[in-house]
Amino acid sequence: MKRFFKVLLSVVGIVLVLVLLFLTIAFSGFRRDKYIAPSYENSSQQPEIKEKIPLLKEDGTLTKPGYCFNNNFEYERSAVKANPLRIKEWDFYQFCNTRYFVQFCIADISMAGYASMVLCDMQTGEKYEIAYIKLLTFGNMNLETNAMQPHLLKYKNKDFDLEVNVEKNHRYIVLNGTKDGVIYTADLDIRMMNNLETITTATPFTAVSDKYFYLNNKFTSMPVSGTITIGELKIEFNPEDTYCCLDWGRGVWPYAGDWYWGNGSTTLKDGTLFGFEITWGFGDASATTGNMMFINGKGHKLGEITAKLEEEGNWMSKWTFTCEDGRFMMTMTPYYDNYTNTRVGFVGNICHQVFGRFDGYVILDDGTKLDIENMFAFCEYSDNRW
């Protein structure tokens, strides 16, 4: 009887979430984001936010769209003046070497929250997933207001126990869980060098509402060490060839839209730690791009970047990346397409996250040209209905 009521409550909760989702979309409208490309000619014209400012004005609009090294935007969920059911917050960690990629995601999309781990063997295509789900969270996942702030996140039920402990130069992830009788464990150390710079952007969705926005802080060039076990499978990660990125996002998103996002890190032949962060295709980007490359943790801002497939619609054909200022000129030869499709009716995302080998060159702020060869990284295209 106890189990019956537990199942009944779960079903009622799911139905309630679906009803709220429908009402949210109906109330907010089936509005689609319209990408507004940059209006400048080079990266030097992009407004850098150099001092701390509130992200939002009292009326809920962005104080000033722009970018900063690290995060000078002060975010408070309570300052949002848009429909609270459309607030989306997440911390998304992803690291990879040439065989495995691993994702840890903690998200609060108001109607539900979740914490999860995904591990994929790109040689075999075998994928392992374990998750914690909580309905009707409305901010109760207690995600931090600044990604650099030391904090501890804990999510636990009888089959899932995840801790993310953020310190000044380390992010420790510890997982213990069970799924279908298989034991999952993770004990990982993500290292941040001193004075690591990141890229933060505040982007409005002006085509939809002046109160819709996306605050995004992206980290890269973070070596990873530690172990993941899944049943009899045990994987050791080496900081010499495994690097992590963090996609830290807070915002109010329209129902429909898409984006491109790419990231990667590697150690060059001379020992230089090189990383890049590129993204485009969503919101009003007339103020700034989210594109930056990093040399030993120091950021070099880039202009608008676009990509073209050698064969349109074939995500495993060669990608060619071009930058408006000629400073990021790359090709990607695909190796693995992490294709996901969660679309059910009018809700869900379809994503082609393509991992591959990057070759080409970049030009730093001082004019130095770096040749990039055989760099393992990814770029994705995501089509969203949420």
Image (cartoon, rainbow, N blue to C red):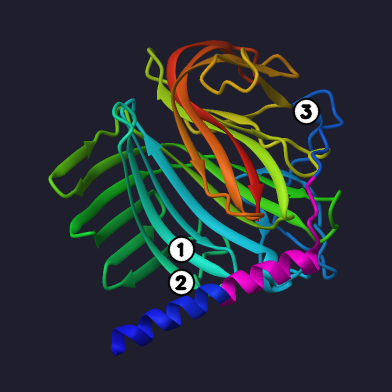
Task: Please tell me whether mark 2 or mark 3 is closer to you in this view.
Answer: 2
Looking at the picture, which amino acid does disc 2 mark?
Lys
Which range is magenta?
16-33
Residue 217: percent from the left, percent from the top? 59, 47
Q: CA distance from mark 3 to mark 1?
A: 39 Å
- The reply to whether residue 82 is in sight is no
For the residues bearing labels 2 and 1, Cβ distance under 8 angstroms = yes
On whether residue 21 falls in the magenta region, the answer is yes
Residue 122: image quadrant is top left
Q: Is residue 343 above or below residue 133?
A: above
Residue at image mark 1: 114
Residue 117: percent from the left, percent from the top? 36, 52
- The reply to whether residue 264 is in sight is yes
Mark positioned earlier in the residue sequence (2 or 3): 3
Residue at image mark 3: 44
Residue at image mark 2: 134
Q: Residue at x 76, y 37 (%)?
A: 288
Q: CA distance from mark 2 to mark 1?
A: 6 Å
Q: Which mark is residue 73?
A: none
**Apparent side of residue 315 relative to residue 222 in the rendered image (left or right):** right
